[in-house]
């Protein structure tokens, strides 16, 4: 099965609308749920579903505990997990930052060379044919924002067309959603004209 991709204009960081080389991005087909993941493992390993659920929960708990204790964690040949922090207020001097001003930010994942090699070998790229793309039901409103934020964690920025395709909504609905997120302060707009992209509010 092919992985579909499309080409997009690269936004100009200066906001002056200068033409930059196109870049390619995967067009997501959706999200594999935990249940689907468990069923796939169950079929391949011939293990009871309850055992797989228990193992995944144990891995999640152990990983979370070690990360919370300040360790970087290597998970077999998958890759490495680590945590990042943020300061809740700007400061130029270490003495200006107190412990209560330092907070957990997120968990980062760095895939191993073997895992990246496996994905690269398995991936068969194909340019998206928009005429052949099947129309799926629109994602519910309460889920669209969550999907966008997850997309931004992986891709830094999103275009109106990408949001529309990701959530299976019309262009008009996509514009309304993005304007709503801008008003809420969740995202901010960068660039102009056809080069407009949206990034997380706290993204540099």
Image (cartoon, rainbow, N blue to C red):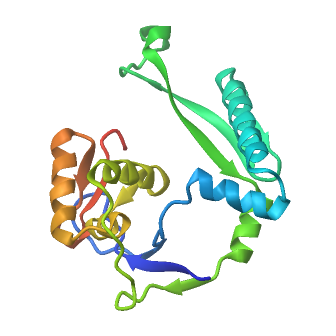
Across and down, in percent, residue 191 comes to 23, 61
Q: What residue appears at the point 80 percent right and 50 percent down from the top-left corner?
A: 48
173 sits left or right of 8 in the view = left
125 sits left or right of 10 in the view = right
Q: What residue appears at the point 72 percent right and 26 percent down from the top-left corner?
A: 66
Across and down, in percent, residue 169 comes to 26, 67
Whether residue 98 is visible = no
Quarter-wise, where is residue 151 in the image? Answer: bottom left
Question: Nearest the camera: 101 or 5?
Answer: 5
Across and down, in percent, residue 5 comes to 48, 78
Q: Is residue 158 above or below residue 74?
A: below
25 sits left or right of 125 in the view = left
Question: Nearest the camera: 15 or 143?
Answer: 143
49 sits left or right of 123 in the view = right
Number of numbered markers: 0
Say which quadrant the N terminus sits in: bottom right
Say which quadrant the C terminus sits in: top left
Q: What residue appears at the point 19 percent right and 40 percent down from the top-left corner?
A: 184
Q: Is residue 148 above or below residue 129?
A: above
Question: Nearest the camera: 3 or 18?
Answer: 3
């Amino acid at each position: 099965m092919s992985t579909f991709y499309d080409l997009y204009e690269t936004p100009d960081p200066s906001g002056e609308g200068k033409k930059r080389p196109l870049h390619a991005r995967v067009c997501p087909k959706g999200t594999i749920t935990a249940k689907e993941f468990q069923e796939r493992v169950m079929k391949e390993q011939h293990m009871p579903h309850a055992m797989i659920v228990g193992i995944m929960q144990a891995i999640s708990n152990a990983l979370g505990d070690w990360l919370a204790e300040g360790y970087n964690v290597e998970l077999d040949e998958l890759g490495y997990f680590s945590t990042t922090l943020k300061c809740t207020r700007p400061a130029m001097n270490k003495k200006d930052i107190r412990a209560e001003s330092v907070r957990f930010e997120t968990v980062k994942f760095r895939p191993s060379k073997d895992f990246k090699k496996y994905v690269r070998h398995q991936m068969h790229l194909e340019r998206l044919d928009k005429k052949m793309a099947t129309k799926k039901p629109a994602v519910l409103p309460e889920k669209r924002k969550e999907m966008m934020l997850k997309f931004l964690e992986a891709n830094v920025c999103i275009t109106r067309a990408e949001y529309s395709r990701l959530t299976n909504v019309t262009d008009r609905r996509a514009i309304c959603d993005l304007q709503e997120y801008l008003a809420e302060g969740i995202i901010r707009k960068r660039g102009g004209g056809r080069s407009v992209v949206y990034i997380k509010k706290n993204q540099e």
